[in-house]
Image: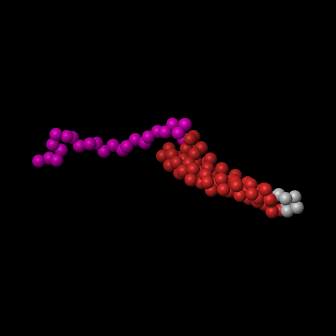
């Protein structure tokens, strides 16, 4: 007796790739590159402020050093959000390719 009683076998058709819109791909790039850019700017700004505070001790520029630490603290606090945005953008970009 045949194993296909009552039902014909399913054809072996390759699945079609889902087409994502241009808007989806743009958001994927925005979510991927925004946290990278913010992190780079924050690290460079923090280092620049710390270097400026260290280089000029005569004019009481220690406030620049504290501001540099505040920038790094902001990066530390925002790191889960930045990481989540980066991972989401990476997944979206992989899906769109």
Q: Do we see residue 44 in this rendering?
A: no
Residue 41 at what x, y percent from top left? Answer: 70, 52
Q: In the image, is residue 83 above or below residue 18?
A: below
Give the residue at x 26% y 42%: 10
Residue 76 at what x, y percent from top left? Answer: 62, 56
Q: Quadrant of residue 9?
A: top left
Identity of the residue furthest to the left in this view? 1
Q: Quadrant of residue 68?
A: bottom right
Give the residue at x 80% y 59%: 62
Q: Do we see residue 27 in this rendering?
A: yes
Give the residue at x 43% y 42%: 17
**Image-based side of 87 in relation to 40, left or right:** left
Which residues are drawn in magenta?
1-25
**Pick the front one: 11 or 51:** 51
Residue 23 at what x, y percent from top left? Answer: 55, 37
Count the labels in the image: 0
Q: Is residue 18 magenta?
A: yes
**Pick the front one: 7 or 42:** 42
**Pick the front one: 69 or 12:** 69
Q: Is residue 37 magenta?
A: no
**Pick the front one: 97 or 66:** 66
Predominant SS along the magenta part: loop
Q: Quadrant of residue 63?
A: bottom right
Q: How was the colour assigned to the protein in this rendering? A: secondary structure
Residue 75 at what x, y percent from top left? Answer: 64, 54
């Amino acid at each position: 007796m045949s194993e296909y009683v009552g039902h014909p076998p399913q054809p072996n058709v390759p699945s079609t790739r889902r087409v994502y819109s241009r808007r989806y791909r743009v958001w994927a790039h925005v979510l991927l590159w925004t946290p990278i850019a913010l992190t780079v700017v924050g690290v460079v700004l923090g280092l620049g402020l710390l270097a400026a505070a260290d280089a000029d001790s005569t004019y009481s520029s220690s406030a620049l050093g504290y501001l540099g630490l505040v920038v790094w603290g902001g990066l530390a606090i925002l790191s889960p959000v930045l990481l989540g945005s980066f991972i989401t953008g990476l997944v979206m970009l992989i899906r769109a390719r």
